[in-house]
Image (tube, rainbow, N blue to C red):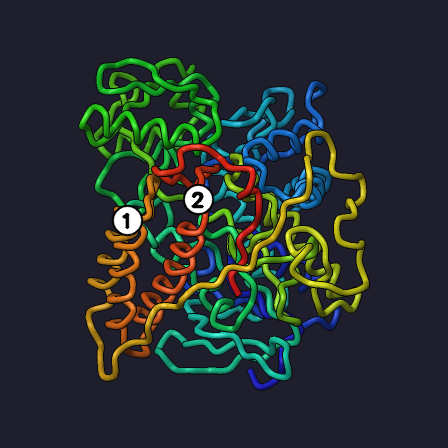
Amino acid sequence: MSQPLDLLVVGSGVAGLSAAVRAAAEPGVRVGVLSKAALAQTATRWAQGGVAAVLHADEDSTDLHLADTLAAGAGLCDPDAVRVLVDEGPARVHELIALGAVFDRDHHGRLLLAREGGHSQPRVVHAGGAATGAEIERALVDAVLETAAVVHERWFAVDLLVEGGRCAGLVALDPAGGRHEIRATHTLLASGGAGQLYSVTTNPLEATGDGIAMALRAGVAVADVEFVQFHPTALHHPAMPRPLLSEALRGHGAVLRDAAGERFIDELAPRDVVARAMTARILEQGVEHMWLDVAPVEDFARRFPTIHASLVAAGLDPEREWLPVAPAAHYVCGGVLTDLDGATTLPGLWACGEVACTGVHGANRLASNSLLEGMVFAPRVLESIAAGRDSPRPTGALRGVVEGAGGPPAGAPAAGGHGPGAGPEVETTLLAWRRPPAPREGCAADAGALRARLQQAMTAGAGLLRSAASLEACGGDVDEVAAAAGGDAAASVEVRNLALVARALLAAATARHETRGAHSRMEYPNSDPAYRRRLVLR
């Protein structure tokens, strides 16, 4: 590890491994992959939803995919970033197939396309019905292991190394807890999200916001963290992470029913709309969950074998009974702010995947755009590094945050233009905020108990329904957790990372006096044009 890497990839989900595979294929390029858990143990593996891309449907188009994404994002998407996503997405899907990923096809060999919430056309490819993430992860892990990449499994990234105004790698703990510096010319954060902020989540235990927290400590710009998407149809079950009942079920006819058995919402509305309607009906009827009726799904067991098997294992019979479902924290729409090529405000540091804020998702992610985002923007990072770039340009979501030459002027459209319905540019506001306190000297409380307390506070005060009072009360709990989270063990660092990301989320949620996308304020039930702006924390 004494010889610096050319590229250090932090995270082994679809974004990180897509970058590592491409970089390791270049002769003479030294690539390292650092994975917090086993290489395949990522949020990508748990993803049931497929990959949204316009592949072969005559009635579909990239303009329609762009329009659907902008509509779901509730006015806060960056249209240039969305145009990149929908235009480059199909080629990335075909590249993944060439690597060995096997997607579901009909008897003629054509890719089967599903329709999910917020999509106007069927354009979502799946593997094994609802095992898409596992298949993508398998193909990418196999490809990485065949390359010359240096793999560090079960290593924990603690902090970025910043020297001379640029990122020079990071500090990490090995599996035994030993501290090391891993130096690299370029560092790519692809460390995933922060679903463990909440007590009910679809995310694995490793999703503790480490990449966002490291960026915040280094003064790197972070944005849109108030928009945490809750998946509407997580199985109401003691298992954690919550088993997910894919949106594709509703795309194939499954319906939501309340405690009285009545339908109450358009099942194919965007996720924020469905999740809020479910929460409102749960509170109104004084119950813990709603019901998903999968009887209308033709040949359910064959079409969705993975979900069917998990339901049977949980003692449920989807052929004969409705399934208990409730919203669960699922995806952070914001993160480390990047330009259209994945560059952050810190030279030498790049980001892609859920840890990043590319501007693609805006206030609410369109279903099945997340895997696609990692597949599209990871190669753009590699192309920029190969071209000799080191610093961000004023493009995409970073427009208005950084200045400089070398790219289109602020406000200029990307190749192909914004497309239909893009609207005016999203304004940027730099938000002042207060970090949580440092741990008290000599304090080393139980990290598991502290994590549980923070999760309970965030679920109650900063979940689907928020108010000024709930956010303030939550902040007090977060500060107390942070002050008690002493020690150098990875579990304690995770708690401090969660507390830091929680404080950033609370600051943005408190400042946004409206309801928009995945952010809901009870005092401000409507969206406000004055808040059609990106809140940036530095």
Q: Is residue 504 visible?
A: yes
Q: Which of the labelled discs sits on residue 469, or is there none?
A: 1
Count of numbered tags: 2
Q: Residue 132, how many percent across, how many down?
A: 50, 39
Please report the residue visible at 23 percent of the width from the left and 37 percent of the height from the top.
237
Q: Which of the labelled discs sits on residue 366, or is there none?
A: none
Q: Amino acid at mark 2?
A: His
Left or right: 192 as drawn, with respect to 58: left
Residue 505, above or below 438: above
Mark before the other along the chain sequence, 1 or 2? 1
Q: Residue 301, how many percent across, how many down?
A: 38, 23
Q: Quadrant of the N terminus?
A: bottom right
- Depth check: 524 or 113 in front? 524
Dot 1 falls on a residue whose secondary structure is helix
- Depth check: 501 or 184 in front? 501
Left or right: 9 as drawn, with respect to 323: right
Please report the residue visible at 31 percent of the width from the left and 42 percent of the height from the top.
242
Q: Is residue 89 visible?
A: no
Most extreme residue toward the bottom is 2
Q: Which of the labelled discs sits on residue 513, or is there none?
A: 2
Q: State the image quarter where residue 325 is shown.
A: top left
Residue 93, above or below 490: above
Q: Residue 495, how many percent across, how many down?
A: 32, 65
Residue 246, above or below 43: above
Residue 25, above or below 157: above
Please report the residue visible at 25 percent of the width from the left and 43 percent of the height from the top.
239
- Depth check: 148 or 129 in front? 129
